[in-house]
Image (cartoon, rainbow, N blue to C red):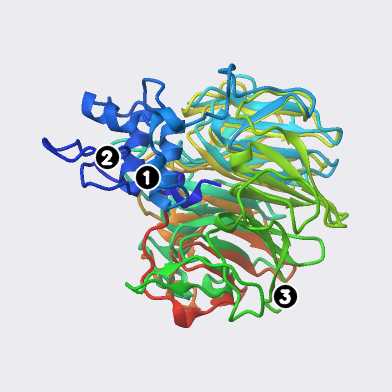
Amino acid sequence: MRLGGFLILLAVAALTCLPAGAQTVMGDLNGNGKVDVADANIALRLAVGVQTATPAQLAVGDVTGDGRIGVDDVQRILSAALGIISPDDLVPDVLVTTVVGDTSIYADGAASVARFSDPEAAAIAPDGSVYVADTGNNRIRRVAPDGTTTTVAGSTAGFRDGPAAQALFNNPYGLAVDSQGVIYVADSSNRRIRKITPDGMVSTVAGAPDSVGGYFIPDFADGPANVAKFGFPAAVAVAPDGTLYVADYGANRVRKVTPDGTVSTIAGNGYVGFDDGKGADAKFAGPAGVAVSKSGTLYVADFGNHLIRAVAPDGTVTTFTGSPRLDQSGAPIGDYQDGPRGTARFNGPANLYLGPDGSLYVADANNNRIRKVASDGSVSTVAGDGEMGSQDGSADKARFNLPGGLAVAPNGTIFVADSYNNSIRRISTDGAVSTFAGVSVTGSNDGPGNQARLFYPEAIAFDASGNLIIADSQNYKIRKLSPDGTVSTIAGDGTPGYADGDAATAEFALPTGVALDALGNIYVADRLNNMIRKITPAGQVSTVAGSKNSGFMDGDALQAQFDMPRNLAVRSDGAVVIADTYNHCIRLLDGKGQVSTIAGAGQAGYLNGLALNALFAYPQALAFDAKGNLLISDADNHMIRVLSPDGTVSTLAGDPATVNGPEAPT
């Protein structure tokens, strides 16, 4: 999962050029003599064409040696900035690319031939299909039970609503499927939540176009769907009543999109940090995942705080679980430890899913593990040995590579969007890990699972038929994985951008969260469009909340603003709750088209208490439990927080005493 950097860097401000006479360091695009996250931000702007590389930038930014600055360069520079690889490894003649002899990173078909590109999320439909957010291919794919992968929607990066075959997404990171089979997609780079209906129509549920300089300058506004703005919607969850909840990673807020498209902030105030409390008093550090319980409580993966947060229906944010350790400056840093609520530790919890037994499952991305949080906040490891890799086998020996979205089938089988392995993994009830669809090669092919390809699937959610809806973020599509393993595209034409309409021509910009309502509508956290999009079962994509400008504004959904909403969840009443990541709050889109902030004070920090006073630090993932508590992955606080129905935020897992001013997640 790229939350630790590739998502966050999308919200960084101005591009800087290399100063004359600066020391030449591979990957050092800002000329400060080292490789840091700012360099990854610059590389991303150059890779997607927002800015043209100067000769000096090309000389240090082309770390893969292919004569240009592309997504692969961004990923390697980011990995060096995060310490995953050494900066000394940023030398073209020692690098080996993943795709050899085949420029295609997209393929539908059987499990052995399907290709994905950074699948970031997955969701299981009632029929057993797994929908995958094939992020790098800007597509939503469907993997049938037999592993066949098909494309549900999306193609090239862009924004376009309409028929699924024409719709366009831009880095879909999150997705969710409602009981009617509607797929909701967090179209992250389009900063919108999109929806793919069962009949193949893609529409925008929420999110308005950016007005302050493009995808990479944060904007935020609550309000009607056509004016609301997301900072970078990374994850989306759908409640039974059709409400969408979005982890607005870029705005550090959890947002809500009601069935009528109104976007509001549930928690977070936009500031990076850690604070529990009510609504705008709470702070997140990159909310990356969101899940909604039957009782209305949202659970948020607070990526930068390394916590799981909970947001109650009244907007109160608490820390559900997690206990980060601090560096010398007092900033929380990720770690790994199982155990009771106050001692467990995460390292960039990226996504959440509430299992049928009420347990909360966490994609602990930077630990390359799948974790489980019991109702008492105690944490255990389900699978993964902590090392990067793609090894199948027993749970304690299996390996993941930045796992993203999660979905749990009624029988307890867990599906994982294994982002950097570009595949969908399956964890059986006996703990055996296997590759369900895709191979460790990026792509966007539909077809049987072994032929289908994803590109950074960011979020997943089940629809009522058992299909897994996938926010295929870098394919800019919403994909569907059917119970037979076939992957198909629901919406998005694969072009990063913004376009509502038919699913096949709709465009998304980094969709990172999806959730479904009871009618089968899919809500999407369109992260870079700062919007919540909606895909109807008929295949119409519309914007239901947010605008393309990042910012913070409650009110009419299409005037509301988000800042990179990372994920969302749909509440039992149909309202959409959104992890408004860069606004550090939780927003709510109600059925009347109004967006409100239900938790988080809009600034990063850590504070429990009343929801609008609570502080989060980049809340990322959301999930509702059976009691209506909203579980929140509070990324930069390294905690799981809880927003209870009475509006109180508390910490479920993690140690609040160790949190002190988290920095923006990388």
| Residue drawn at the location 42% of the way across and 75% of the way down | 613
**Mark 3 sits on what residue?**
375
Residue type at the position of mark 2: Val
SS of the residue at dot 3?
A: loop
Q: CA distance from mark 3 to mark 1?
A: 42 Å
86 relative to 396 in the view: left or right = left
Q: Earlier in the sequence, mark 3 or mark 2?
A: 2
Q: Residues within 10 Å of mark 2 (few under 14, many from 20)?
A: some
Q: CA distance from mark 3 to mark 2?
A: 48 Å
**Mark 1 sits on what residue?**
87
193 relative to 53 in the view: left or right = right
Percent coordinates x, y for residue 226 in the rendering = 45, 40
Percent coordinates x, y for residue 356 in the rendering = 81, 61
**Mark 2 sits on what residue?**
25
- Given residues 233 and 553, the one toward you in this image is 233
Residue type at the position of mark 1: Pro
Residue 121 makes an appearance in the image: yes
Percent coordinates x, y for residue 601 in the rendering = 39, 68
In the picture shown, does residue 353 fall above or below 465?
below
Q: Earlier in the sequence, mark 2 or mark 1?
A: 2
